[in-house]
Amino acid sequence: MAMHASRFPGHDTVFEEARIKGRATARSEDILRVLELRGIDVPEAARERITNCTDLDTLGTWLDRTLTVASTEELFQEA
């Protein structure tokens, strides 16, 4: 019996892009919240950089760094 992979309607389309954008928005909100709770100042330029980022890997790295950085400059430093 042959297996046929079905494609979810909306895969690789506007729906998928919206889902990713939603995840990115949530992750950027998490980053800003952790920085706020830690008392780290977030200048407007840094806030825009965080909220405009849609790369989930980058946002994940930044979220991890929020636990140890002392400033937003450290958040954005290349490893």
Image (tube, rainbow, N blue to C red):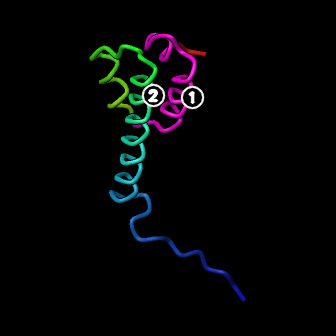
**Residue lying at 41% horizontally and 71% vertically, measured from the top left:** 9
Query: Of residues 13 and 54, which is closer to you in this image?
Result: 54
**Image spot of residue 31 (x, y percent):** 44, 30
- x, y (%) of residue 10? 39, 65
> Residue at 32% of width from left, 31% of height from top?
52
**SS at circle 1:** helix
Query: Quadrant location of the C terminus?
Result: top right
Foreground pick, 12 / 67: 67
Residue type for callout 2? Val
Q: Tell us which disc is closer to us: 1 or 2.
A: 2
Disc 1 crowd rating (10 Å Cα; few below 14, some 14-19, many 20+) is few
Residue pictured at 72% horizontal, 89% vertical? 1
Residue depicted at x 41% and y 15%: 40
Q: Quadrant of residue 24?
A: top left
State which tag comes first along the sequence, 1 or 2. Answer: 2
Image coords of residue 44 (percent x, y)? 27, 17
Whether 68 is among the magenta residues is yes
Residue type beneath disc 1: Asp
Looking at the image, residue 66 lies above or below residue 30:
above
Which numbered marker is on residue 34?
2
> Rounded to the nearest whole Å, what is the CA distance between mark 1 and mark 2?
10 Å
Mark on residue 27?
Answer: none
- Circles 1 and 2, Cβ within 8 Å, touching? The answer is no
Helix, strand or loop at label 2? It is helix
Q: Which residues are magenta?
A: 54-76
Q: Quadrant of residue 4?
A: bottom right
Residue identifier under label 1? 64
